[in-house]
Amino acid sequence: MTQKLISMTKKELERSNVIQNLIDGKINGTDASKQIDLSIRQIRRIKANVKKHGIIGLIHASRGKQSNRKLQNNLIERAKKYLKEKYYDFGPTFASEKLLKVEKININRETIRIILDKMGLRKIKQRKQSKNRHVWRARKDNYGEMQQFDGSYHIWFGDEETCLLLSVDDATGKITYAKFDINESAKTVFKFWLEYFDKHGLPLSIYLDKFSTYKINHKNAVDNKDMITQFQRATNQIGVKLITAHSPQAKGRVERMNGTLQDRLVKELRLAGITTIDEANKFLEEYIPKFNAKFAVVPQRGKDLHKKINNIVREKLLQIFSIQNARKINNDYTVRFENNYFQLDEQQPTTVYKKDSVIIEEHLDGEIKINLKEHYLNYKILPERPQKEINIKLAALTRQKQNSYKPPIDHPWRTQFLFNRRKNKATGCVLTNAIKSE
């Protein structure tokens, strides 16, 4: 008869002595329960197992057997292969999602974390301790009540930094619009919001930060220093409240969203082989709905507070969302703007005087318009700077005279007019003669 070697822990040995004394009648069930700190019910179950199977009845039945939850070795090896080749910079959660969705490998994130640690691929981010504590602000109640806006400079794809312009709804945490561009200038921001208005309508308010030194002096910056002033003027004209935050923490939702995207979106763009801004923007059209389905929340109330726009308002928005600067008309009826001289024509839609204040509008399509009292002036660009001493005799530029049209003598209107004129003359003669005869 072959003997089987049984491995037992110290705890199990102590239990075996107590259970044996219980079987021999040296102690009762209550005493056994107190000695090994188990309930009476468990003591009875263990006693029955020992009587039936012997001392092996104390050992768990699954000891020495392979776990039903143990992963197959080939599954782990496949996961390691993909983690090394494709998902080497992914975190455990994101890597687990990608392995299941793309590679059809179902491994939980904790197992992935262990595998990444063993492979030396996991990088633990050091969190900075914040000195100042910021009060948590509750979300807005309705969708469209507030949009948090920010531009994030980052190496999103390729080797150069680009800027992701991002709008996040405060009530839902939903990305309402996102677009890659070269910078966060007044023109790019204006284009962003005009496209937003076409898609959603006008929100009640927009929350953005005052520019940091980094953003103002960024190498891609063009007119960043003037962005807040121009944007404030434009939003004020259309009735959208502009709120400027004095710290990134004040608009934490869009800041945290940028952090999430800098982790997840960068990896998605790399896997998709994106190298240009146009490709990245096209990718966002499919990516954002999936991202929102995963991370957006339900608002407190179900109202959409966006104000829809019609074609008339849309045309007006193109004029409002232009770069506008005030200038004076010189004595020679020229206007100087950005080292260019605009000579006003003699015929204008309204009367123009020297020293009048005008608004130079730089439209997003590149067209420059000179606005005087809601009239666009006619001009031509001079090839060079005009001479200083010019004798201008005109006191003012006036409206263009309308050409008077004189119909021919056989025109029906004129024929009727001449007929009536002759008739009136004849009647007058008759009346005069009648008076004389009296």
Image (cartoon, grey):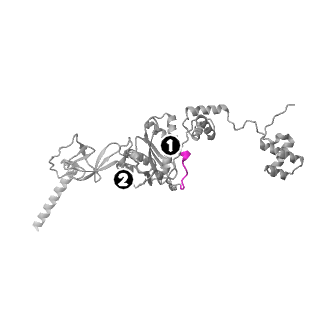
Task: Work out whether 91 lies above or below 319.
Answer: above
Assess whether mark 1 and mark 2 are in contact (beta carbons under 8 angstroms).
Answer: no
> Given the image, on which type of amino acid does mark 2 rest?
Arg
Residue 213 rendering spot, x and y as whole percentages = 39, 47
What is the three-letter code of the residue carrying label 1?
A: Leu
Is residue 248 or residue 332 the one in the foreground? Answer: 248
SS category of the residue bearing label 1? helix
Q: Residues within 10 Å of mark 2 (few under 14, many from 20)?
A: some
Q: Upstream in the sequence, badge 2 or badge 1?
A: 2
Q: Nearer the viewer, residue 305 or 263?
A: 263
Magenta stretch contains residue 197: no
Q: Is residue 294 magenta?
A: yes
Image quadrant where residue 75 sits: top right
- Residue plotted at (86% across, 41% down): 52
Residue that numbered label 1 is attached to: 261
Task: Kindly identify the residue that appears in the image at 58 percent across and 35 percent down.
Answer: 120
Quadrant of image for the C terminus: bottom left
Q: Position of residue 181 (x, y in %)?
A: 42, 41
At horizontal 19% and vertical 43% (from top left) the residue drawn is: 386
Magenta-highlighted stretch: main secondary structure?
A: loop
Please provide the residue range marked out in magenta. 292-301
